Amino acid sequence: MSHELGRLEDLPQDYRDELARQNLVPLWPSLRAVLPPGIPARQTRATRWRYADIRPLLLRAGELTPIEKAERRVLVLANPGHTLEKMQASAAIYLGMQLLLPGEWAPSHRHTPNAVRMIVEGEGAWTTVDGEKCPMHRGDLILTPTGLWHEHGHDGNAPVIWLDVLDLPLVYYTETSYHLNGTTQTVEPGQGHRAYARAGLVPTPVFDRSGRRYPLLRYPWAEARAALLSLAGDRPGLDHVQITYVNPETGEDAQNILGLHALMLRPGQTLALPARSPAAVYHVIEGAARVATDAQGFDLAPADTCCIPGYTATTLTNASATGPAFLFVADESPLHRKLGVYEVRADGQPAMPAQP
Ligand code: 1HN
């Protein structure tokens, strides 16, 4: 039953004025807007950003704005559905492409939002996170979780570009976003993170557990790629060839708020994903793919990125009939699970999760 509710205009002006003077608002004229029937209102629009469009503009930013004037030289991938000023890709996800030129240094700081970097182009750059110097190679995923010091440097001789993914919109919305500046970190070689970088092997608990909340910070693409190829090879019937970046101590999502995955499409494969509550970002690491909803589709070349709103069935198609395509996927699923609102609409029907 969904009958018409009273409108604001139905109320006498003097009454409305008095409510406003007292900082009071009648709920009923807005009730349907905040609780729409069956499916949430989403400002997030399916949006695609082409690397070929971003790259020259980012390189131009390198000429226009010295690193000292930018601290982080980034062009933000802003979803027009949220308005560009909000700098959001979705309700919880921020995306940016960052440029570091040879010899530049982006100074050490730390902040409450969680960040990850997916390296897109160039060799010779590094990011130091929590005292660990992490080399940046194409396809590597490097975490800079909440509160950890991080700075970027570049000893190579060509531009380095990476994709930043942060939960900044959510952290900003909750009025908990801030940063602290620091000084250059002291790098202590072999201080421990690398001991976690091999699958299934962790330091023995009683002797050398780091006790760190984030024991592994760098996930090399060579390892992720090999894991996907093994999974695809060992499980020929498996459609959803996907791995999740996890914390090796706990097996849980690598970070608190956003989910991080790598996905392989077999040659010629089309993968139909059901509508799920979280918004998702797809970024091509290798190959080419089409990401389509009922309403529209994007052809993605290497390093292209798109964002798909939540509650939207999505089809991923490998553009090649002969080779695999590899995508990096970031989504809001850890957040939705923690909030108890995560849902999958396998048959397209609302499946409101009942809380225990
Ligand atoms: C940040 O700290 C970095 O450290 C990149 O590279 C992008 C966007 C918003 C807020 C902080 C970085 C960021 C950011």
Image: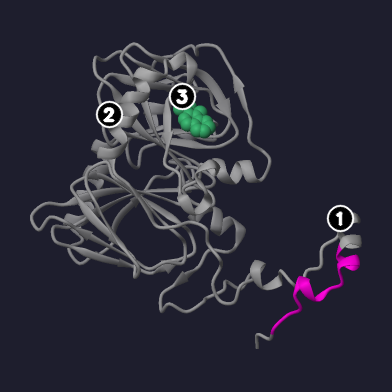
**Secondary structure beneath disc 1?**
loop
Pointer 1 with pointer 2, Cβ within 8 A? no
**Colouring of the image:** one colour
Camera-near label (1 vs 2) is: 1
The amino acid on which the numbered mark 2 sits, given as a three-letter code, is His
Which residue in the protein does label 3 denote? 72
C-alpha span from label 1 to label 2: 54 Å
What segment carries the magenta color? 4-16
Question: What amino acid type should be assigned to the residue bearing mark 3?
Answer: Arg
Q: Mark 1 points at which residue?
A: 23
Q: Mark 3 near ligand 1 (CB under 8 Å)?
A: yes
Residue farthest toward the front in the current orientation of the protein: 13
Q: Which residue is drawn at 48% across and 21% down?
A: 70
What's the residue type where badge 1 is placed?
Asn
Name the residue that disc number 2 marks. Answer: 137
Q: Quadrant of the N terminus?
A: bottom right
Name the disc covering residue 323, or none.
none
